[in-house]
């Protein structure tokens, strides 16, 4: 397998690499360095699957959202 590079391809690769490096540099300089609160600090509401009761009742639910 041979890789053939001409001036146009080399220039395109160099411009692409320099663009990526520049974007990473700008993103790093403008990054917000504050502490971000995560969801681990929030209490999670879990669904109720069953309830102990003496009454004979059935609940039918449909989950339409994935």
Image (cartoon, grey):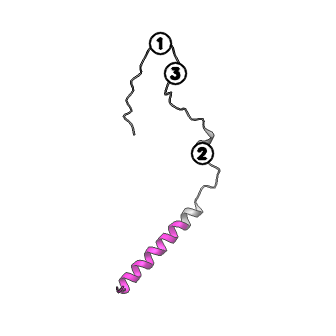
Seen in the image, is 36 located left or right of residue 11? right
Please give the residue where the numbered disc 2 appears in the rendered image.
38
Mark 1 burial class by Cα count in 10 Å: few <14, some 14-19, many 20+: few
Residue at position x 50%, y 66% from top? 23
Residue at position x 58%, y 58% from top? 31
Mark earlier in primary sequence (2, 3): 2
Query: Residue 22, position in %: x, y?
Result: 51, 70
What distance separates the C-alpha of mark 1 from that of mark 3? 10 Å
Q: Magenta segment, which residues?
A: 1-24
What distance separates the C-alpha of mark 2 from that of mark 3? 31 Å
Q: Residue furthest top?
A: 55
In the displayed structure, would residue 37 be above or below residue 27? Answer: above
Judge depth for marks 2 and 3 and give the one in front. Answer: 3
Residue 51: assigned label:
3
- Observer-nearest of 1 and 21: 1
Mark earlier in primary sequence (1, 2): 2
Residue 55: assigned label:
1
């Amino acid at each position: 397998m041979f890789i053939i590079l001409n001036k146009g391809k080399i220039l395109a690769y160099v411009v692409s690499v320099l663009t990526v490096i520049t974007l990473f540099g700008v993103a790093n300089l403008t990054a917000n360095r504050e502490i971000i609160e995560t969801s681990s600090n929030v209490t999670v509401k879990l669904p109720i699957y069953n309830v102990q009761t003496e009454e004979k009742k059935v609940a039918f639910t449909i989950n339409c959202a994935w």
